[in-house]
Image (cartoon, helix red, strand yellow):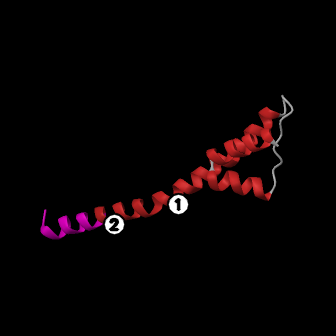
Amino acid sequence: MDLEMIFYGLVGLVLLYLTIKLLKWPLKILLNGVIGIVLLYVANYLGTYVGFYIGINAVTALIAGFLGVPGVIFLVVFKMFL
């Protein structure tokens, strides 16, 4: 192997590492939001059996989307005390 190929390989590895680092944070936030929305629907589905329902509107969707699992827990606890 010549020195040029080793250099290109190292540059490629560094670029791959930086790309993964940059995409990790937005993907984590997106996954957290999707999990929150799915849990909100699951809580509503299971809650219908016991007469518990959280209205899905813009505010509850934003809370579940931005906060994820803690947001859904907050909505459930808030609804219980309301």
Q: Secondary structure at mark 1?
A: helix
Decide: few, some or many residues near mark 2? Use Cα within 10 Å; few <14, some 14-19, many ≥20: few
Quadrant holding the C terminus:
top right
Distance, label 1 to label 2, CA atoms, is 18 Å
Closer to the camera in the image, 22 or 68: 68
**Percent position (x, y) of residue 49?**
84, 29
Question: Residue, x 77% and y 57% (percent of image)?
Answer: 59
- Specify whether residue 45 is painted magenta: no
Q: Overall secondary structure of the magenta stretch? A: helix
Range covered by the magenta-colored residues: 1-12
Q: Which residue is mark 2?
A: 15
- The answer to which of marks 1 and 2 sits earlier in the sequence is 2
The kind of residue on which mark 2 rests is Leu
The vertical placement of 38 against 11, above or below, is: above
Q: Which residue is mark 1?
A: 26
Question: Which dot marks residue 42?
Answer: none
**Percent position (x, y) of residue 14?**
29, 64
